[in-house]
Amino acid sequence: LEWRPQAVQQYLKQTNRFLELLCLAIYITGGQPARGPELLSVHWRNGTLQDCNLYVIDGQVAVVTRYHKLQSQWDRPRVVPRFLPEVVGQLV
């Protein structure tokens, strides 16, 4: 197996572009627009300190974020689910 650096760079560039467009599609079609920190904090798998934010509920993909602006008033963050249209959900 021989690595082709130019092909690897092209693949990474295309992957980043796809993720940018996917992020835009989620932002535009996922209901009320999320704030930047909410949208960019989405995890696609469980981590050591953070749970996944993508769920399939009754066949629909949902992005679940936590909104912290009013946390001081409610003493906990508000959970905000955003259901994606079927076409965007299939991309996810």
Image: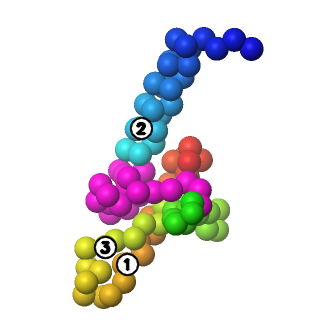
How many other residues sit within 10 Å of disc 3, few (<14), some (14-19) or many (≥20)?
some
Contact flag, marks 2 and 3 (Cβ < 8 Å): no
Q: Label 1, secondary structure: give it.
A: strand
Tag nearer the camera, 3 or 1: 3
Amino acid residing under circle 3: His
> As shown in the figure, which amino acid type bears the numbered disc 1?
Arg
Residue shown at the point (34%, 71%) measured from the top left: 67
Q: Secondary structure at mark 3?
A: loop
From the viewer's perspective, is the residue at label 2 or at label 1 nearer?
1
Number of numbered discs on residues: 3
Q: Rounded to the nearest whole Å, what is the CA distance between mark 2 and mark 1?
A: 27 Å
Q: What is the number of the mark on residue 68?
A: 3
The relative height of residue 63 versus residue 76 in the rendered view (above or below) is above
Mark 1, residue position: 78
Which residue occupies 54% across, 22% down?
11
Image quarter in which the N terminus is found: top right
As for residue 34 lying within the magenta part, the answer is yes
Read off the residue under disc 2. Answer: 21
User: Is residue 73 shown left or right of residue 16?
Assistant: left
Callout 1 environment at 10 Å: few (<14), some (14 to 19), or many (20+)?
Answer: some
What is the three-letter code of the residue carrying label 2? Leu
**Magenta residues?**
26-46
| Mark toward the start of the polypeptide (3 vs 1) | 3
